[in-house]
Image (spheres, rainbow, N blue to C red):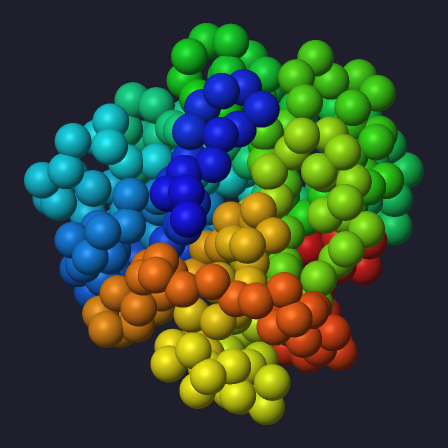
Amino acid sequence: MDTHFTLNNGVTIPAIGYGTWQIENGPAAIETIAEAIRTGYRHIDTAACYGNEKSVGAAIASCGIDRRQLFVTSKVWNTERGYDSTLRAFDRSLNDLGLNYLDLYLIHWPASPHRFSDWQQINASTWRAMERLLRNGLVRAIGVSNFMPQHLAALLSTAAVTPAVNQIEFHPGYRQAECVAYCRELGILVEAWSPLGRGKVLEHETIAALARHYSKTPAQICLRWILQQGILPLPKSVTPSRMKTNLDLTGFELSAEDMQRLTAISYCGASGLHPDSVDF
């Protein structure tokens, strides 16, 4: 298994990321994130709205790992969309993280037509700010999160830079196949948030049976299934033993038949959040 993916601008990104959603800012968060880095994670995913960028930054500062060996992602929140506000939001994130650049910066959610009549213009102006950050060397790559094909198509009609990444909800029981296929056609790497289906899919009988068959944890089965499709998972755990097993996905490969069994799992474990219906 490759340890990195290569983005469409040539930047390499560690193939497994550590998600920090719901890790609350504070000393415990600093220790948790530092433990993830000690365990071997080199790709840390945060966001302004997670409220933990200061803890992520403190963990990075204290971990003893060269900054250049780490890949750090953050995201601009919905209330900060637009050209000037995106640039200000980025400055705040960079300051809170205590860094002088980010490896990846994402639009967290698209503005959508159910909330904004000018949603296309809002996304376009936000993206222009992202492109400026890229030109100025403040980020190594830019991308989006939770963009469906219709949002991507509208964005690309005015974009100078194709997003490098689209981070979407993806796990057994919720594949978003149309969006994944669309991203692949455009050379956009798909990242999987909630790759374990909020824990609910881990109890599914198919996953439990495969975990026994391969002598792996149910989480390892889910994450391996994601990786074998060329998608980057972002598992999150605050338990050191699970951090370790979630990162240990080498040494086994799911058969084509077992991949299909996982693909065939019906709707399960999804958050229910969709960009064309959320109220935030």
Q: Is residue 12 visible?
A: yes
Left or right, 243 with respect to 61, comes to right
> In screen coordinates, is 94 left or right of 98?
right
Q: Residue at x 37, y 54 (%)?
A: 18
Percent of width and height locating residue 206: 60, 85
Furthest residue to the top?
A: 136
Q: Judge whether 10 appears above or below 224 on screen.
A: above
Determine which quarter of the picture holds residue 129. top right
The relative height of residue 128 versus residue 86 in the rendered view (above or below) is: above
Q: Where does the image place residue 40, in percent across and percent down from the top left? A: 22, 51
Position in image of residue 56 (x %, y %) = 28, 47
Place of residue 90 in the rendered image (x, y in percent of width and height, measured from the top left): 46, 28
Which is nearer the eye, 247 or 97? 247
User: Residue at the location (67% across, 75% down)?
Assistant: 261
Quadrant in the picture for residue 161: top right
Q: Is residue 118 above or below residue 51?
A: above
Q: How many marks?
A: 0
Could you tell me which residue is drawn at 59 percent across and 16 percent down?
A: 131
Q: Is residue 172 visible in the rendered structure shown here?
A: no
Seen in the image, is 148 located left or right of residue 100? right
- In the rendered image, the quadrant that contains the C terminus is bottom right
The residue sitting at 60% across, 38% down in the picture is: 189
